[in-house]
Image: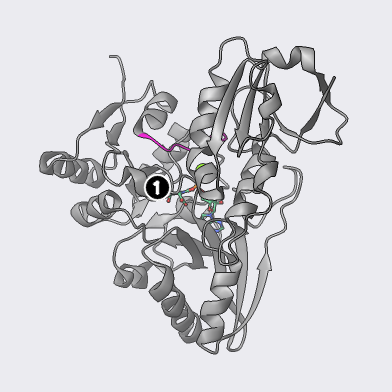
Protein backbone atom coordinates (compact mmCIF):
# COMPACT_ATOMS: atom_id res chain seq x y z
CA UNK A 1 0.00 0.00 0.00
CA UNK A 2 1.24 3.47 -0.82
CA UNK A 3 2.26 5.55 2.18
CA UNK A 4 1.70 9.30 2.18
CA UNK A 5 1.73 12.02 4.78
CA UNK A 6 -1.48 14.05 5.19
CA UNK A 7 -1.92 17.58 6.53
CA UNK A 8 -5.04 17.87 8.71
CA UNK A 9 -7.05 21.01 9.46
CA UNK A 10 -7.34 21.92 13.14
CA UNK A 11 -10.84 20.62 13.91
CA UNK A 12 -12.13 18.88 17.06
CA UNK A 13 -12.29 15.66 15.04
CA UNK A 14 -8.62 16.03 14.13
CA UNK A 15 -7.62 16.39 17.79
CA UNK A 16 -9.73 13.34 18.72
CA UNK A 17 -7.86 11.37 16.06
CA UNK A 18 -4.53 12.68 17.41
CA UNK A 19 -5.45 11.42 20.86
CA UNK A 20 -6.21 7.94 19.50
CA UNK A 21 -2.99 7.89 17.47
CA UNK A 22 -0.77 9.05 20.34
CA UNK A 23 -2.40 6.61 22.80
CA UNK A 24 -1.84 3.74 20.38
CA UNK A 25 1.88 4.48 19.92
CA UNK A 26 1.68 6.36 16.61
CA UNK A 27 3.37 9.62 15.56
CA UNK A 28 1.82 13.06 15.02
CA UNK A 29 3.74 16.07 13.60
CA UNK A 30 2.73 19.33 15.27
CA UNK A 31 3.74 23.00 15.09
CA UNK A 32 5.41 24.81 17.99
CA UNK A 33 6.56 28.40 18.38
CA UNK A 34 10.07 27.29 17.32
CA UNK A 35 9.92 24.55 14.67
CA UNK A 36 7.67 21.55 13.93
CA UNK A 37 7.99 18.52 16.22
CA UNK A 38 7.60 14.81 15.44
CA UNK A 39 5.60 13.74 18.49
CA UNK A 40 4.82 10.46 20.24
CA UNK A 41 3.86 9.29 23.74
CA UNK A 42 7.02 9.96 25.77
CA UNK A 43 6.41 7.11 28.19
CA UNK A 44 5.95 4.51 25.46
CA UNK A 45 9.44 3.24 24.50
CA UNK A 46 8.17 1.61 21.30
CA UNK A 47 6.54 4.83 20.12
CA UNK A 48 9.74 6.77 20.87
CA UNK A 49 11.82 4.18 18.99
CA UNK A 50 9.60 4.75 15.99
CA UNK A 51 10.57 8.45 15.99
CA UNK A 52 14.25 7.45 15.83
CA UNK A 53 13.54 5.05 12.99
CA UNK A 54 11.52 7.54 10.94
CA UNK A 55 14.06 10.35 11.36
CA UNK A 56 17.12 8.12 10.90
CA UNK A 57 18.32 9.61 14.18
CA UNK A 58 21.38 8.20 15.97
CA UNK A 59 20.09 6.59 19.15
CA UNK A 60 22.64 8.35 21.35
CA UNK A 61 20.72 11.60 20.84
CA UNK A 62 18.18 12.30 23.60
CA UNK A 63 14.70 13.67 22.87
CA UNK A 64 12.86 16.60 24.45
CA UNK A 65 9.66 15.86 26.39
CA UNK A 66 6.89 18.44 25.84
CA UNK A 67 4.36 19.15 28.58
CA UNK A 68 1.62 21.69 29.30
CA UNK A 69 1.43 21.87 33.13
CA UNK A 70 4.37 22.17 35.53
CA UNK A 71 2.94 19.43 37.79
CA UNK A 72 3.54 16.94 34.94
CA UNK A 73 7.26 17.27 35.67
CA UNK A 74 6.95 15.75 39.14
CA UNK A 75 6.82 12.19 37.87
CA UNK A 76 9.54 12.45 35.24
CA UNK A 77 12.17 14.45 37.15
CA UNK A 78 14.14 13.72 40.29
CA UNK A 79 15.36 17.06 41.64
CA UNK A 80 17.01 18.20 44.85
CA UNK A 81 15.04 20.76 46.88
CA UNK A 82 17.30 23.52 45.57
CA UNK A 83 17.13 22.36 41.93
CA UNK A 84 13.34 22.37 42.14
CA UNK A 85 13.35 25.86 43.62
CA UNK A 86 15.61 27.17 40.83
CA UNK A 87 13.66 25.32 38.16
CA UNK A 88 10.44 26.96 39.38
CA UNK A 89 12.03 30.42 39.42
CA UNK A 90 13.27 30.05 35.84
CA UNK A 91 10.05 28.35 34.70
CA UNK A 92 7.95 31.22 36.02
CA UNK A 93 9.67 33.63 33.67
CA UNK A 94 10.42 31.55 30.55
CA UNK A 95 7.62 28.99 30.23
CA UNK A 96 5.64 28.56 28.14
CA UNK A 97 8.39 29.50 25.73
CA UNK A 98 11.30 28.58 23.47
CA UNK A 99 13.57 27.02 26.08
CA UNK A 100 14.28 23.45 27.16
CA UNK A 101 15.58 22.63 30.63
CA UNK A 102 17.69 19.50 31.00
CA UNK A 103 16.96 18.11 34.48
CA UNK A 104 17.82 14.96 36.43
CA UNK A 105 15.34 12.30 35.30
CA UNK A 106 13.27 9.92 37.39
CA UNK A 107 13.49 6.24 36.57
CA UNK A 108 10.14 6.11 34.78
CA UNK A 109 11.62 7.99 31.80
CA UNK A 110 12.46 5.49 29.05
CA UNK A 111 16.15 5.23 28.14
CA UNK A 112 15.16 5.97 24.53
CA UNK A 113 14.30 9.52 25.71
CA UNK A 114 17.44 10.14 27.79
CA UNK A 115 19.80 8.24 25.47
CA UNK A 116 20.68 6.18 28.53
CA UNK A 117 21.85 9.19 30.54
CA UNK A 118 20.50 10.51 33.83
CA UNK A 119 18.95 13.67 32.45
CA UNK A 120 15.77 14.53 30.60
CA UNK A 121 15.12 17.62 28.47
CA UNK A 122 11.69 19.19 29.08
CA UNK A 123 9.85 22.06 27.44
CA UNK A 124 6.45 23.76 27.75
CA UNK A 125 5.79 25.10 24.25
CA UNK A 126 4.04 28.44 23.79
CA UNK A 127 1.82 27.40 20.93
CA UNK A 128 -1.92 26.82 21.22
CA UNK A 129 -1.86 23.84 18.83
CA UNK A 130 1.00 22.10 20.60
CA UNK A 131 -0.70 22.73 23.97
CA UNK A 132 -4.01 21.41 22.72
CA UNK A 133 -2.33 18.26 21.40
CA UNK A 134 -0.66 17.62 24.78
CA UNK A 135 -3.82 18.38 26.80
CA UNK A 136 -6.16 16.38 24.56
CA UNK A 137 -3.97 13.33 24.30
CA UNK A 138 -3.36 13.31 28.09
CA UNK A 139 0.25 12.25 27.45
CA UNK A 140 3.67 13.79 27.71
CA UNK A 141 4.84 14.23 24.14
CA UNK A 142 8.39 13.34 23.11
CA UNK A 143 9.37 15.35 20.04
CA UNK A 144 12.52 16.13 18.13
CA UNK A 145 12.35 18.55 15.21
CA UNK A 146 10.26 17.00 12.41
CA UNK A 147 12.99 16.67 9.78
CA UNK A 148 15.06 13.77 8.53
CA UNK A 149 18.10 13.65 10.81
CA UNK A 150 20.75 16.17 9.73
CA UNK A 151 18.50 18.07 7.32
CA UNK A 152 17.25 21.65 7.83
CA UNK A 153 14.59 21.93 10.55
CA UNK A 154 10.96 22.36 9.41
CA UNK A 155 9.18 25.71 9.64
CA UNK A 156 6.01 24.81 7.73
CA UNK A 157 3.77 21.77 7.35
CA UNK A 158 5.03 21.43 3.73
CA UNK A 159 8.61 21.06 5.00
CA UNK A 160 7.49 18.15 7.19
CA UNK A 161 5.50 16.69 4.30
CA UNK A 162 8.55 16.85 2.00
CA UNK A 163 10.88 15.13 4.48
CA UNK A 164 8.42 12.30 5.20
CA UNK A 165 6.98 11.78 1.72
CA UNK A 166 6.99 7.99 2.07
CA UNK A 167 5.49 7.78 5.54
CA UNK A 168 1.89 7.59 6.58
CA UNK A 169 2.41 10.66 8.78
CA UNK A 170 -0.37 12.66 10.43
CA UNK A 171 0.61 16.35 10.22
CA UNK A 172 -1.28 19.11 12.01
CA UNK A 173 -1.84 22.18 9.85
CA UNK A 174 0.31 25.26 10.56
CA UNK A 175 -2.17 28.07 9.82
CA UNK A 176 -2.76 29.04 13.46
CA UNK A 177 0.02 31.21 15.00
CA UNK A 178 1.93 31.26 11.70
CA UNK A 179 3.36 34.71 12.30
CA UNK A 180 4.37 33.99 15.87
CA UNK A 181 6.98 31.34 15.04
CA UNK A 182 10.66 32.03 15.72
CA UNK A 183 11.90 29.50 13.18
CA UNK A 184 14.92 28.26 15.13
CA UNK A 185 14.93 25.65 17.86
CA UNK A 186 14.65 26.23 21.60
CA UNK A 187 17.58 27.21 23.80
CA UNK A 188 18.71 24.08 25.70
CA UNK A 189 20.16 24.52 29.18
CA UNK A 190 21.21 21.94 31.72
CA UNK A 191 20.53 22.69 35.35
CA UNK A 192 22.29 20.86 38.18
CA UNK A 193 23.20 21.47 41.82
CA UNK A 194 26.82 20.33 41.90
CA UNK A 195 27.86 21.86 45.20
CA UNK A 196 25.36 22.71 47.90
CA UNK A 197 23.05 25.61 47.03
CA UNK A 198 25.00 26.62 43.92
CA UNK A 199 23.32 25.92 40.62
CA UNK A 200 25.39 24.92 37.60
CA UNK A 201 23.92 26.09 34.33
CA UNK A 202 25.30 24.81 31.02
CA UNK A 203 23.95 26.28 27.82
CA UNK A 204 23.98 23.25 25.52
CA UNK A 205 22.28 24.95 22.56
CA UNK A 206 21.93 28.68 22.03
CA UNK A 207 18.58 30.17 21.03
CA UNK A 208 16.24 33.10 21.39
CA UNK A 209 16.45 33.15 25.20
CA UNK A 210 20.04 34.04 26.06
CA UNK A 211 22.44 33.22 28.88
CA UNK A 212 22.22 36.80 30.08
CA UNK A 213 18.48 36.53 30.58
CA UNK A 214 19.00 33.42 32.76
CA UNK A 215 21.69 35.25 34.77
CA UNK A 216 19.30 38.15 35.42
CA UNK A 217 16.55 35.79 36.58
CA UNK A 218 18.92 34.05 39.01
CA UNK A 219 20.46 37.28 40.30
CA UNK A 220 17.12 38.93 40.92
CA UNK A 221 16.23 35.93 43.09
CA UNK A 222 19.61 35.87 44.91
CA UNK A 223 20.50 32.42 43.55
CA UNK A 224 24.21 31.56 43.44
CA UNK A 225 25.21 30.11 40.10
CA UNK A 226 27.92 29.11 37.63
CA UNK A 227 27.03 29.51 34.00
CA UNK A 228 28.91 28.20 30.97
CA UNK A 229 28.36 27.73 27.28
CA UNK A 230 28.91 24.15 26.15
CA UNK A 231 32.05 24.03 24.09
CA UNK A 232 31.23 22.27 20.84
CA UNK A 233 33.79 19.72 19.75
CA UNK A 234 34.67 20.03 16.09
CA UNK A 235 34.50 16.39 15.11
CA UNK A 236 32.09 13.54 15.51
CA UNK A 237 34.46 11.02 17.08
CA UNK A 238 34.33 12.47 20.59
CA UNK A 239 31.56 11.20 22.86
CA UNK A 240 29.63 14.32 23.68
CA UNK A 241 27.66 15.41 26.68
CA UNK A 242 24.98 16.64 24.32
CA UNK A 243 25.07 14.32 21.32
CA UNK A 244 22.73 16.47 19.25
CA UNK A 245 25.55 18.95 18.86
CA UNK A 246 26.95 17.22 15.79
CA UNK A 247 29.23 19.28 13.63
CA UNK A 248 27.28 18.69 10.41
CA UNK A 249 23.66 19.50 11.08
CA UNK A 250 20.72 21.51 9.74
CA UNK A 251 22.28 21.01 6.31
CA UNK A 252 20.86 21.44 2.81
CA UNK A 253 21.51 18.64 0.30
CA UNK A 254 24.03 20.66 -1.78
CA UNK A 255 27.26 22.15 -0.38
CA UNK A 256 26.87 25.45 1.45
CA UNK A 257 29.52 28.05 2.34
CA UNK A 258 29.74 31.26 4.34
CA UNK A 259 31.19 34.14 2.35
CA UNK A 260 34.42 35.53 3.88
CA UNK A 261 37.25 37.71 2.63
CA UNK A 262 39.78 35.20 3.84
CA UNK A 263 39.28 31.62 2.72
CA UNK A 264 41.24 28.90 0.93
CA UNK A 265 38.18 28.04 -1.09
CA UNK A 266 37.63 30.57 -3.83
CA UNK A 267 35.09 31.05 -6.58
CA UNK A 268 35.47 33.32 -9.59
CA UNK A 269 32.75 35.83 -10.33
CA UNK A 270 32.25 34.16 -13.68
CA UNK A 271 31.19 30.97 -11.83
CA UNK A 272 28.70 32.70 -9.56
CA UNK A 273 26.01 31.86 -12.09
CA UNK A 274 26.13 28.29 -10.78
CA UNK A 275 25.56 29.36 -7.16
CA UNK A 276 22.55 30.37 -5.13
CA UNK A 277 23.26 33.38 -2.91
CA UNK A 278 21.47 33.73 0.42
CA UNK A 279 21.77 37.25 1.74
CA UNK A 280 20.70 39.21 4.81
CA UNK A 281 20.27 42.97 4.77
CA UNK A 282 21.53 43.42 1.20
CA UNK A 283 24.89 41.74 1.67
CA UNK A 284 26.39 40.45 -1.63
CA UNK A 285 23.84 42.60 -3.50
CA UNK A 286 26.46 43.23 -6.19
CA UNK A 287 26.02 39.62 -7.38
CA UNK A 288 22.24 39.74 -7.43
CA UNK A 289 21.95 39.81 -11.23
CA UNK A 290 24.72 37.34 -12.02
CA UNK A 291 24.09 34.49 -9.56
CA UNK A 292 21.74 31.58 -10.33
CA UNK A 293 19.26 32.73 -7.71
CA UNK A 294 19.37 35.44 -5.05
CA UNK A 295 17.37 34.70 -1.90
CA UNK A 296 16.70 37.32 0.74
CA UNK A 297 16.73 36.44 4.46
CA UNK A 298 15.38 39.82 5.58
CA UNK A 299 16.85 42.72 7.51
CA UNK A 300 16.93 41.73 11.18
CA UNK A 301 18.16 38.80 13.25
CA UNK A 302 14.53 37.81 13.93
CA UNK A 303 13.86 37.78 10.16
CA UNK A 304 16.91 35.59 9.59
CA UNK A 305 15.80 33.14 12.30
CA UNK A 306 12.30 32.94 10.80
CA UNK A 307 13.51 32.47 7.23
CA UNK A 308 16.77 30.56 7.42
CA UNK A 309 15.46 26.99 7.14
CA UNK A 310 12.80 27.82 4.53
CA UNK A 311 15.37 29.63 2.39
CA UNK A 312 17.95 26.84 2.70
CA UNK A 313 15.26 24.40 1.61
CA UNK A 314 14.41 26.60 -1.40
CA UNK A 315 18.08 26.97 -2.29
CA UNK A 316 18.81 23.24 -2.31
CA UNK A 317 16.01 22.75 -4.86
CA UNK A 318 17.38 25.22 -7.43
CA UNK A 319 17.98 23.26 -10.60
CA UNK A 320 21.58 23.49 -11.80
CA UNK A 321 22.96 24.87 -8.51
CA UNK A 322 26.34 23.48 -7.48
CA UNK A 323 26.45 25.31 -4.17
CA UNK A 324 25.00 27.89 -1.81
CA UNK A 325 26.84 31.02 -0.62
CA UNK A 326 25.47 32.62 2.54
CA UNK A 327 26.22 36.08 3.93
CA UNK A 328 24.71 37.68 7.01
CA UNK A 329 27.66 40.00 7.66
CA UNK A 330 25.51 43.13 7.46
CA UNK A 331 23.72 41.99 10.60
CA UNK A 332 26.73 41.52 12.82
CA UNK A 333 26.20 44.81 14.60
CA UNK A 334 22.72 43.90 15.88
CA UNK A 335 22.55 42.48 19.36
CA UNK A 336 19.89 42.17 22.02
CA UNK A 337 21.76 41.42 25.22
CA UNK A 338 19.04 39.15 26.65
CA UNK A 339 18.98 36.97 23.56
CA UNK A 340 21.55 34.63 22.02
CA UNK A 341 19.78 34.70 18.67
CA UNK A 342 22.95 35.97 16.96
CA UNK A 343 25.03 33.12 18.43
CA UNK A 344 22.30 30.65 17.50
CA UNK A 345 22.21 31.82 13.87
CA UNK A 346 26.00 31.69 13.59
CA UNK A 347 25.91 28.21 15.13
CA UNK A 348 23.31 26.94 12.61
CA UNK A 349 25.24 28.48 9.72
CA UNK A 350 28.54 27.00 10.78
CA UNK A 351 26.97 23.55 11.12
CA UNK A 352 25.01 23.64 7.88
CA UNK A 353 28.20 24.64 6.03
CA UNK A 354 30.41 22.32 8.13
CA UNK A 355 32.45 25.45 8.87
CA UNK A 356 33.38 26.01 5.20
CA UNK A 357 34.11 29.56 4.00
CA UNK A 358 34.34 30.82 0.44
CA UNK A 359 35.88 33.94 -1.08
CA UNK A 360 34.53 35.45 -4.28
CA UNK A 361 37.25 36.82 -6.58
CA UNK A 362 37.26 38.71 -9.91
O1 LIG B 1 12.51 23.91 19.60
C1 LIG B 1 12.80 22.73 19.85
O2 LIG B 1 13.53 22.41 20.79
C2 LIG B 1 12.18 21.66 18.93
C3 LIG B 1 10.68 21.64 19.17
C4 LIG B 1 9.98 20.56 18.41
O3 LIG B 1 10.42 21.54 20.54
N1 LIG B 1 12.77 20.39 19.21
C5 LIG B 1 14.05 20.09 18.85
O4 LIG B 1 14.42 18.79 19.14
O5 LIG B 1 14.79 20.90 18.32
P1 LIG B 1 15.76 18.13 18.55
O6 LIG B 1 15.74 16.72 18.99
O7 LIG B 1 15.82 18.37 17.10
O8 LIG B 1 16.91 18.88 19.31
C6 LIG B 1 16.99 18.72 20.72
C7 LIG B 1 18.37 18.99 21.23
C8 LIG B 1 19.37 17.97 20.74
O9 LIG B 1 20.58 18.64 20.46
C9 LIG B 1 19.51 17.04 21.94
O10 LIG B 1 20.77 16.41 21.97
C10 LIG B 1 19.31 18.00 23.09
O11 LIG B 1 18.34 18.93 22.65
N2 LIG B 1 18.77 17.28 24.26
C11 LIG B 1 17.53 16.79 24.42
N3 LIG B 1 17.43 16.11 25.59
C12 LIG B 1 18.65 16.19 26.17
C13 LIG B 1 19.21 15.66 27.37
N4 LIG B 1 18.50 14.89 28.19
N5 LIG B 1 20.51 15.92 27.63
C14 LIG B 1 21.26 16.67 26.79
N6 LIG B 1 20.79 17.18 25.63
C15 LIG B 1 19.51 16.95 25.32
MG1 LIG C 1 16.65 18.78 15.35
Residue 126: in magenta span: no
| Closer to us: 226 or 342 | 342
Counting from the top left corner in percent of width and height, residue 349 is at 65, 40
Q: Which residues are magenta?
A: 150-156
Display colour scheme: one colour
278 up-or-down from 91: above or below: above
Q: Is residue 306 left or right of residue 262?
A: left
Counting from the top left corner in percent of width and height, residue 196 is at 60, 88
Check the picture and name the quadrant holding the N terminus: top left
Q: Which residue is mark 1?
A: 181
| Closer to us: 31 or 80 | 31
| Element on which disc 1 rests | loop
Residue at the image position 64 percent from the left and 36 percent from the top = 352
Residue at the image position 43 percent from the left and 32 percent from the top = 54
Asked whether residue 151 is in view, the answer is no
173 up-or-down from 123: above or below: above
Residue at the image position 68 percent from the left and 15 percent from the top = 290
Secondary structure predominantly adopted by residues drawn in magenta: loop
Check the picture and name the quadrant holding the C terminus: top right
| Closer to us: 133 or 23 | 133
In which quadrant of the rendered view does residue 47 lie?
Answer: top left
* Most distant residue in the left direction: 13
Estimate how packed mark 1 is, as few (under 14), some (14 to 19) or many (20 or more) residues with alpha carbons within 10 Å: many
Count of marks, rendered view: 1
In which quadrant of the rendered view does residue 174 lie?
Answer: top left
Counting from the top left corner in percent of width and height, residue 28 is at 30, 39
Residue at the image position 31 percent from the left and 21 percent from the top = 4
Counting from the top left corner in percent of width and height, residue 103 is at 50, 68
Q: Is residue 28 left or right of residue 198?
A: left
Asked whether residue 282 is in view, the answer is yes
In which quadrant of the rendered view does residue 321 lie?
Answer: top right
Amino acid sequence: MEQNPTIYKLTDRTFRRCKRLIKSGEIVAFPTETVYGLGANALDPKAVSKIFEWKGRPNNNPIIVHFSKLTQLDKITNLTYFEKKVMNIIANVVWPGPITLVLRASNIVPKEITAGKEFVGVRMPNDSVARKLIDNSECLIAAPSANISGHCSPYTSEHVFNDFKDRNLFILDDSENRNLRFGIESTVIKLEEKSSSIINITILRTGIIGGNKIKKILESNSIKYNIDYYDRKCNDTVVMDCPGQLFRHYAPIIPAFIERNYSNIIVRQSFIKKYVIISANNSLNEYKDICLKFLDLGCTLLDVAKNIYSILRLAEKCIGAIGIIISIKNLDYMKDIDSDIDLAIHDKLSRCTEGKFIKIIK
